[in-house]
Image (cartoon, rainbow, N blue to C red):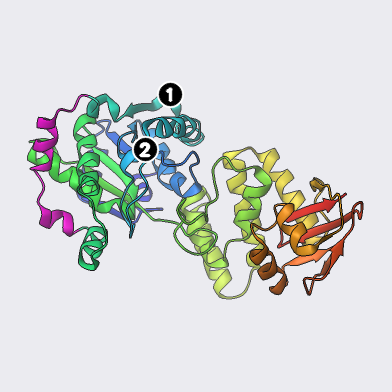
Amino acid sequence: MDVSELLSRGVAEVIVESELRARLQSGTPLRLKQGFDPTKPDMHIGHAVGLRKLRAFQELGHQVVLIVGDWTAQIGDPSGRDETRTRLSAAEVRANAETYMEQFFRVVDRQRTEVRWQSEWFGQFTLENALDLAGRFTLAQMLSHETFRKRYETGAPLTILELMYPMLQAYDSVAIKADVEFGGTDQKFNILAGRELMAQLGMTPQQVFLVPLIPGTDGRKMSKTFNNTVDIRMPPAEMYGRIMSMSDEVLPLYFEVLTDVPMAEVHEMKTAMAAGQVNPRDLKMRLAREIVAQFHDPAAAAAAEAAFIRQFVERELPEDIPNFALEAPAGIVEVLVAAGLAPSKSEARRLIDGGGVRVDGERVDGYTLTLNPGANVVVQVGRRKFVRVV
């Protein structure tokens, strides 16, 4: 990949692009920083957008430094949050971080990556260090952060601890002497804080490399908070199905940021979709195949696609339907809850009202249906949830 494509494909903004371009052309290896707060054990493919960029820089000879935010995760990144997060314990963060390591290296080259934990420097921080750091930023600067400003103006709780978050992330850049920091567009304020702090301390300010946030299964930004993610460790068939459930509108962006399909071909897809010259489902199947192969392997992708075709194109039932043992006659609402197909009776009724429940392929139109033990019928909710009553 040449420098022009490196700085344009799947890129939202570079600050300052001319400076970064010059540093890339100088031939000097750069230290590329990206941090993750292990607030939950799973990463999702939205995280992989930045990781894929890091891998492309690695292939040009640059050094990746992954920061495990074992201190900032205990606060929780306040960006885009309208309420204070529940704080995690150090033990919870450590357990989540262990799973992150395996997921990092499904994309980034382990041999060319330096992994650093914030506890290396914050574990030695004194009150004097903390006060010095806090004294380098003003309240006006912090309230220019959109999230902080909105919460302050509406009277929502805003803790001093949360105001410290951008400062701590900024200090990470100082600690590892970052040349470039990578992040999603929601990280712009935090990454610019690192640039500001480095300048104050007489260091060469880091460049800012922002990648777009991708939409999740519900159209909102992909986020563990919204439970709309495609997780990196998700089983192949489930990952394939999640991609197929995305709206057609995400296809060009997903092909751009999550695959190596040439951009000329991506533009052709977009044009063909707009003109109605291609079935979006065919493009979506190709995308799902590409993504599953990337995080698992081509054989897993082929198997996931074959299962999808059987179930949704040819309308055959999946091969691995779990059994649900019914010991006494029960109404359909109770069966849905007991079998784990609905979290509550009210949600079960909502699913039935919406036409999303079928028994042996026939739509359930009311709540009066009773199933008997040993009925050997398949109960289906939506397109991907099945149990066989035995």
| Kind of residue sitting beneath label 2 | Phe
Q: Earlier in the sequence, mark 1 or mark 2?
A: 2
Q: Nearer the viewer, mark 1 or mark 2?
A: 1
Vertical relation: 222 (above or below) 303: below
Using the image as rendered, state which of residue 85 and residue 101 is in the foreground.
85
Magenta range: 124-144
Vertical relation: 337 (above or below) 36: below
Using the image as rendered, state which of residue 202 and residue 157 is in the foreground.
157
Badge 2: residue crowd in 10 Å (few <14, some 14–19, many ≥20): many
Q: Position of residue 98 (x, y in %)?
A: 46, 29
> Residue at point 74% right, 63% down?
333
| Kind of residue sitting beneath label 1 | Gln
Q: Main secondary structure of the magenta part?
A: helix
**Real-space Cα separation, disc 1 to disc 2, in angstroms:** 14 Å
Residue underneath mark 1: 111
Residue underneath mark 2: 57
Is 132 colored magenta in this rendering?
yes
User: Along the horizontal axis of the image, is 296 left or right of 22?
Assistant: right
User: Along the horizontal axis of the image, is 292 left or right of 332?
Assistant: left
Q: Position of residue 94 (x, y in %)?
A: 41, 30
Residue 328 circle label: none
Determine if residue 181 is in view: yes
Determine if residue 62 is in view: no
> Residue at point 62% right, 42% down?
293
